[in-house]
Image: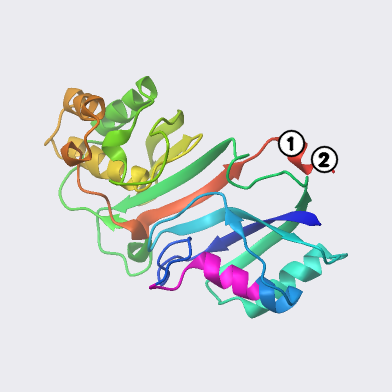
Amino acid sequence: MQRYFLYLAYNGTRYHGWQIQPNGVTVQECIEKALALLLRTETPVVGAGRTDSGVHARLMVAHFDTEKRLPDLTEFGEKLNRVLPCDISICKVVPVCPDAHSRFDALSRTYRYYMIDRKDPFAGAYAWRYHGILDFDKMNEAAARLFCYTDFTSFSKLHTDVKTNNCRIMKAHWRKENDLWVFEIQADRFLRNMVRAIVGTLYDVGRGRLSVEDFCRIIEEKNRCKAGTSAPGNALFLVDVDYPKRIFEI
């Protein structure tokens, strides 16, 4: 039995997120169907995380196991791309150690969230259009306070099945990129809906509805109802997942 990592990208617009659900098409479902077709057996895949409905990935990682020999991984990736929908793309297939795990071995994940202040027929589909003036300096001041905390219950979807709401944030910063404002956040793990809840609450800081101190109090209260409304999913991208080198040394 050999384990492989799939590196893939997808436009999440028409999908109900990554993870298989009973009522709605998901990215995981499409990947498993494509693998089953090529390998001629049911082949479960495990993703590095769960993206919500409508959220995109410039880089997602998933693993699968197979007893079949795959001598040409470039050709196998091309075959997968031929049977997958046009909005899901396999970037590469990589052999890994038998115990390598796409989710549990990930050292960090990085997301980017995009905002724009004008109507744009192209970027507008993948950015949250805001109106008025936002104080991005103040939003960055609040974002920097995220490093002071580990419990992010206030930014987690309610009633999830995780054992802990603790995360270690390594990067959180807004920057201007041409006409877009980009929020990049990196952490060892993320809670369900966490990035969108953080962005929605930072948006309230930028509009002057919340102070930086209010933002900190919201985190400390560990109450999702105190945080801002989740930002729209169409502007969120998973852009990187990092792993230790040892899992590729086979």
Q: Amino acid at mark 2?
A: Glu
Task: State whether residue 174 is above or below residue 141.
Answer: below
Please tell me whether the stretch drawn in magenta is mainly helix, strand or loop.
Answer: helix
* Left or right of 134, for residue 39: right
In front: 109, or 173? 109
Name the element at disc 1. helix
Question: Image quadrant for the C terminus?
Answer: top right
Task: Please state which of residues 100 and 133 is positioned toward the viewer in this rendering.
Answer: 100
- The colour scheme used here is rainbow
Number of numbered discs visible in the structure rendering: 2
Is disc 2 in contact with disc 1, using a CB cutoff of under 8 Å? yes
Amino acid on which disc 1 is placed: Lys
Residue denoted by label 2: 249
Q: CA distance from mark 2 to mark 1?
A: 7 Å
- The image quarter in which residue 12 lies: bottom left
Where residue 185 appears, as percent x and y from the top left, is 43, 38
At 61% from the left and 69% from the top, the residue drawn is 32
The quarter holding residue 33 reads bottom right
Image: magenta residue range: 23-34
Q: Residue furthest left?
A: 209
Q: Can you give x and y, in whole percent of width and height, for residue 220 in the image? A: 24, 24
Residue hosting label 1? 245
